[in-house]
Amino acid sequence: MQGVPDDRQEPDGGGARSGAGTAGDAPSGAATALRSTWRAVRRVVIAVVGSVVLLAGLVLLVTPGPAFVVIPIGLGILAIEFPWARRWLDHVRTRVKQAVGRDGGGEKPPVRTTRDGEAV
């Protein structure tokens, strides 16, 4: 690393480094830059893919298609990286749970049977 003195010495007692160096030298700076670049690229890819899926879901609101399935998928992709999308996704989840609970989504109609007890 630049600007940081290195107190380690070579086994022969000399302070000079030979050849390519050891595994812990320069790659730390390069690894940090690579990691930083990877995070930025990942964030951009997630933003683009999530936005495309979310926009497709919004288009499906006015055209025939499964908008109410696609929109939460897009929010889920965006929620991987963005806290605002996670809040929206939580809001959508609570609204869906309320809607399912309101109309009795778990109730089944009674089964009609004959006098012998067989289902009709």
Image (cartoon, rainbow, N blue to C red):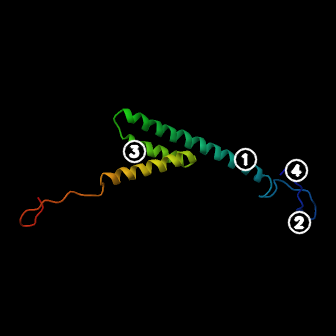
Q: Quadrant of residue 108?
A: bottom left
Residue that appears at 64% across and 43% down: 40
Q: Residues within 10 Å of mark 1 (few under 14, many from 20)?
A: few
> Earlier along the polypeptide chain: callout 3 or callout 2?
2
Say which amino acid is labelled 1. Ala
Q: Tell me the SS state at disc 4.
A: loop
Residue at the disc numbered 4: 3
Residue that appears at 67% across and 44% down: 37
Q: Does residue 65 lie above or below 110 as drawn?
A: above
Looking at the image, which residue sits at the far left? 115
How far apart, in angstroms, are the residues tagged by discs 1 and 2?
30 Å
How far apart, in angstroms, are the residues tagged by discs 3 and 4?
54 Å
Residue at the disc numbered 2: 11
Say which amino acid is labelled 3. Val
Q: Does residue 94 lie above or below 53 as drawn?
A: below
How far apart, in angstroms, are the residues tagged by discs 1 and 4?
17 Å
**Disc number for residue 33:** 1
